[in-house]
Amino acid sequence: MKITEVRIRKLGSEGKLKAYAAVTFDECFVVHNIKVIDGKAGLFVAMPSRKKHGWRIYGCSSSN
């Protein structure tokens, strides 16, 4: 599995949350809402933590 795209959206706030990211794997599987947080030991990423009911899988396309 290879990372084929990374999109980062910087936030202009003064809080600990610095950005949101989306990562595409193998031009098919996308993980949205990854948080970039400024912690005590530096920047780190937090994976999405929402529970989803009724997961749906959509077909792969270049516009993920």
Image (cartoon, rainbow, N blue to C red):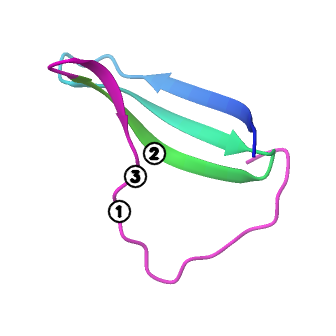
Q: Which residue is mark 3?
A: 48
Tell me the residue at 69%/42% (across/down).
Answer: 24
* Circles 3 and 2 in contact, beta carbons < 8 Å: yes
Residue 63 magenta: yes
* Circles 3 and 1 in contact, beta carbons < 8 Å: yes
* Circles 2 and 1 in contact, beta carbons < 8 Å: yes
Q: Which residue is mark 2?
A: 33
Tell me the residue at 72%/32% (across/down).
Answer: 5
Q: Position of residue 38 (x, y in %)?
A: 24, 21
Residue 51 magenta: yes
- Place residue 14 in its image quadrant: top left
- Numbered disc 1: secondary structure: loop
Q: Which mark, by number, is residue 50?
A: 1
- Numbered disc 2: secondary structure: strand
- How crowded pointer 3 is (Cα within 10 Å; few <14, some 14-19, many 20+) is rated as few
- Numbered disc 3: secondary structure: loop
Callout 2 amino acid = Asn
Q: Which mark, by number, is residue 39?
A: none
Q: Is residue 27 left or right of residue 18?
A: right
Tell me the residue at 44%/81% (across/down).
Answer: 53
**Marks 3 and 1, how far apart at CA:** 6 Å
**Marks 3 and 2, how far apart at CA:** 6 Å
Residue found at the far right of this picture: 61
Q: Is residue 21 left or right of residue 5?
A: left
